[in-house]
Image (cartoon, rainbow, N blue to C red):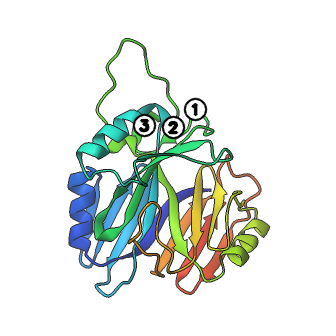
Amino acid sequence: MQIMSVDTVTRSTAETAAYYETVLGLPVRKEIGAVEVTVGRSVIRFREDADAEGDQHYAFLIDDARFDAARAFLAAGPGLLSDGARTEFEAQPAWNARSLYFPGPDRSVLEVIARRDLPSNLGAGHVSGAKASSPHVPGTQPAPFGPGDLLSVSEVGIAVPDVAGTADRLTDAGIGRYPDGSATFSPAGHIDGMLILVSPGRTWFPTSDRVVAEPPVTVVAQAGAASPGVVPGRYELAPGRVLVVRP
């Protein structure tokens, strides 16, 4: 279930555009009342809503071979979010992934995630030659981490009033549910893209002050090779929150 686009809101399009353009170096297209950010083969469109409540979460896919470069880049730039002394997070065994979290614009919690089970020939969309798992060539100096290393939107956090019930409905549509969920947290999707279903009022890991609210969001995804059995369609997750899966 490859995430192709996300349409949501931000309290400040100016702040959001400046962050993605200057801090992460991503392509940004500005228009009146909105801003569009290209992340590899995905696009996030933010519309301005100064009264929007709560904070958002997105994870961006990176090559596992670029993880150390990502850590150095983020530590020197926006900084890394921590849980105690930890700034690097190994996911549960079923995920076979590791992550770094960092503060984004408009109080968002951003993440880069390296998923080791993705096929080595997964392309990076607009970035020629980039791979999701490409070995480092011995004796060469790794290139500095840059916007071309962000391959796609890998996760979108979405608040729903009934986490378990929503995850069950998506499971019936072939959108798998990851283990180790709870009544307030359930990842739904596949290694090529997933939704993080959470209860409103919960905080975004690893923070204690970035709070999940219920902003409108539409996620458009495409059933991919890593997500067989997904049933295309439009899924109303909660009022104002929609998943559209294309064949």
The residue tagged 3 is: 67
Name the element at disc 3: helix
Looking at the picture, how far across and down is residue 13, in whole percent?
Answer: 26, 73
User: In this figure, which residue is indicated by the disc labeled 2?
Assistant: 132
Q: Give the residue pinned by disc 1.
A: 120
Q: Within 10 angstroms of label 2, few (less than 14), some, or many (20 or more) residues?
A: many
Residue mark closest to the camera, 3 vs 2 = 3
Q: Residue at x 74, y 74 (%)?
A: 169
- Nearer the observer, 135 or 77: 77
Structural distance between the alpha carbons of marks 3 and 1: 15 Å
Residue 170: x and y, percent? 71, 69
Q: Which image quadrant for residue 126? A: top left
Q: Earlier in the sequence, mark 2 or mark 1?
A: 1
Which residue: 35% across, 40% down? 71
Under mark 1, the amino acid is Ser
> Mark 2 and 1 residues: CB-CB less than 8 Å, in contact?
yes
Q: Secondary structure at mark 2?
A: loop
The secondary element bearing badge 1 is classed as loop
Tell me the quarter of the image containing the N terminus.
Answer: bottom right
Q: Earlier in the sequence, mark 3 or mark 1?
A: 3
